[in-house]
Image (cartoon, rainbow, N blue to C red):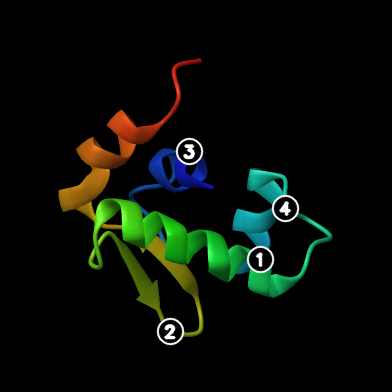
Amino acid sequence: MLSVLVANQHRVISRGELSKLAGLEGLSERRCDSVLVQIRRHLGPGSVTTVRGRGWRLSAAHVQAATAALPDE
């Protein structure tokens, strides 16, 4: 999910799209939320902004830390 947020850092991404792109499609909606909690714990509380009724966006101030946290591919 972190890589999806980094790739879409300039826009709000919905739960459905985030789940689909992260390969979590078909799992509980709460699974998406729990992964976001883990990302916020790792990057900091302001790292992922919730846009009520629309989805989430990676904070511009946390893009570098998020990119560094991604595994080397």
Where is mark 1, residue-wise?
A: 31
Is residue 14 among the parts visible in the rendering?
Answer: no
Q: Residue at 60% of width from left, 56% of height from top? A: 18
Q: CA distance from mark 3 to mark 4?
A: 13 Å
Q: Residue at 28% of width from left, 52% of height from top? A: 43
Mark 2 and mark 3 lie on one chain; the one further toward the N terminus is 3
Where is mark 4, residue-wise?
A: 24
Where is mark 3, residue-wise?
A: 3
* Foreground: disc 3 or disc 1: 1
Q: Secondary structure at mark 1?
A: helix
Residue that lies at the very extreme toward the bottom in this rendered image:
53
Q: How many marks?
A: 4
Q: Amino acid at mark 1?
A: Arg
* Foreground: disc 1 or disc 2: 1
Q: Amino acid at mark 3?
A: Ser
Q: Amino acid at mark 4?
A: Leu
